[in-house]
Image (cartoon, rainbow, N blue to C red):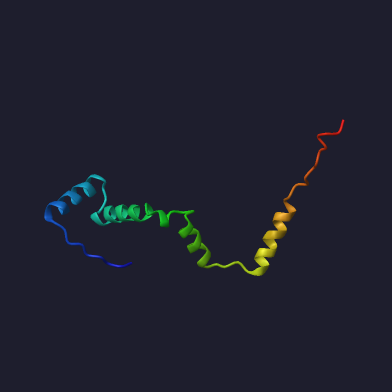
Amino acid sequence: MANLNIEMPDDLARSLEGIAAAQRKSIQQLALERLISLVEDIPERRAGSPAAVLRAMQEAPHPTAADVEELDALIAAGRLPVRARDLFSD
Protein backbone atom coordinates (compact mmCIF):
# COMPACT_ATOMS: atom_id res chain seq x y z
CA MET A 1 0.00 0.00 0.00
CA ALA A 2 1.34 3.44 -0.89
CA ASN A 3 1.85 6.11 1.75
CA LEU A 4 0.51 9.60 1.15
CA ASN A 5 1.10 12.57 3.43
CA ILE A 6 -1.33 15.46 3.15
CA GLU A 7 -0.71 18.85 4.67
CA MET A 8 -3.83 20.67 5.83
CA PRO A 9 -4.81 23.48 8.14
CA ASP A 10 -4.98 22.60 11.84
CA ASP A 11 -8.70 23.39 12.10
CA LEU A 12 -9.49 20.97 9.26
CA ALA A 13 -7.39 18.25 10.92
CA ARG A 14 -9.26 18.78 14.21
CA SER A 15 -12.60 18.58 12.41
CA LEU A 16 -11.58 15.33 10.74
CA GLU A 17 -10.45 13.93 14.10
CA GLY A 18 -13.87 14.76 15.53
CA ILE A 19 -15.75 13.15 12.65
CA ALA A 20 -13.57 10.03 12.82
CA ALA A 21 -14.00 9.75 16.58
CA ALA A 22 -17.78 10.10 16.29
CA GLN A 23 -17.82 7.25 13.77
CA ARG A 24 -15.38 5.21 15.89
CA LYS A 25 -12.85 5.19 13.07
CA SER A 26 -9.30 6.30 12.64
CA ILE A 27 -8.64 9.37 10.52
CA GLN A 28 -6.98 7.05 8.00
CA GLN A 29 -10.10 4.85 7.76
CA LEU A 30 -12.31 7.90 7.33
CA ALA A 31 -10.05 9.38 4.66
CA LEU A 32 -9.78 6.11 2.75
CA GLU A 33 -13.56 5.63 2.71
CA ARG A 34 -14.12 9.16 1.45
CA LEU A 35 -11.40 8.94 -1.19
CA ILE A 36 -12.70 5.58 -2.42
CA SER A 37 -16.17 7.05 -2.77
CA LEU A 38 -14.74 9.87 -4.90
CA VAL A 39 -13.09 7.38 -7.25
CA GLU A 40 -16.22 5.22 -7.47
CA ASP A 41 -18.27 8.27 -8.43
CA ILE A 42 -16.17 8.85 -11.55
CA PRO A 43 -18.34 7.62 -14.45
CA GLU A 44 -15.38 5.95 -16.20
CA ARG A 45 -14.73 3.82 -13.09
CA ARG A 46 -18.32 2.64 -12.57
CA ALA A 47 -19.12 -1.01 -13.24
CA GLY A 48 -20.71 -1.39 -16.65
CA SER A 49 -19.31 1.84 -18.05
CA PRO A 50 -17.57 1.55 -21.43
CA ALA A 51 -14.22 2.19 -19.76
CA ALA A 52 -14.89 -0.48 -17.11
CA VAL A 53 -15.91 -3.01 -19.77
CA LEU A 54 -12.77 -2.27 -21.77
CA ARG A 55 -10.63 -2.66 -18.64
CA ALA A 56 -12.29 -6.00 -17.85
CA MET A 57 -11.66 -7.21 -21.39
CA GLN A 58 -7.99 -6.27 -21.17
CA GLU A 59 -7.42 -7.83 -17.75
CA ALA A 60 -6.67 -11.49 -17.17
CA PRO A 61 -8.01 -14.14 -17.34
CA HIS A 62 -8.56 -14.27 -21.06
CA PRO A 63 -10.81 -17.09 -22.29
CA THR A 64 -9.25 -19.73 -24.50
CA ALA A 65 -10.75 -20.94 -27.76
CA ALA A 66 -11.93 -24.05 -25.88
CA ASP A 67 -13.70 -21.84 -23.32
CA VAL A 68 -15.53 -20.00 -26.09
CA GLU A 69 -16.51 -23.26 -27.81
CA GLU A 70 -17.84 -24.65 -24.53
CA LEU A 71 -19.86 -21.48 -23.92
CA ASP A 72 -21.29 -21.61 -27.44
CA ALA A 73 -22.27 -25.26 -26.93
CA LEU A 74 -23.97 -24.47 -23.61
CA ILE A 75 -25.89 -21.59 -25.16
CA ALA A 76 -27.01 -23.80 -28.06
CA ALA A 77 -28.09 -26.56 -25.66
CA GLY A 78 -30.20 -24.09 -23.70
CA ARG A 79 -32.13 -22.77 -26.69
CA LEU A 80 -35.81 -23.56 -26.92
CA PRO A 81 -37.34 -24.49 -30.24
CA VAL A 82 -39.31 -21.76 -31.95
CA ARG A 83 -42.84 -22.75 -32.93
CA ALA A 84 -44.30 -20.82 -35.80
CA ARG A 85 -48.08 -20.51 -35.88
CA ASP A 86 -49.94 -19.65 -39.01
CA LEU A 87 -52.13 -16.82 -37.77
CA PHE A 88 -53.93 -16.41 -41.07
CA SER A 89 -55.14 -19.95 -41.73
CA ASP A 90 -58.80 -20.61 -41.05
Name the spot of residue 27 as percent of width and height, x first.
23, 54
Q: Is residue 62 above or below residue 51?
A: below
Q: Residue at x 81, y 34 (%)?
A: 87
Does residue 30 appear to the left or right of 58 in the view shown?
left
Q: Residue at x 51, y 67 (%)?
A: 58
Residue reaching furthest front?
88
Residue at left offset 68%, top offset 68%? 66
Q: How many marks?
A: 0
Seen in the picture, residue 1 relative to 25 is either above or below; the reply is below
- Horizontal side of 47 relative to 35 (left or right) equals right
Relative to 27, residue 23 above or below = above
Check the image and name the residue furthest to the left: 10
Above or below — where is 70 with respect to 41?
A: below
- Identify the image quadrant of the C terminus: top right
Q: Position of residue 55 (x, y in %)?
A: 48, 63
Q: In this rendered view, identify the residue nearer to me: 2 or 64.
A: 64
The percent position of residue 19, horizontal first and vertical second, equals 22, 47
23 or 4: nearer the viewer? 4
Residue 1 rendering spot, x and y as whole percentages: 33, 67
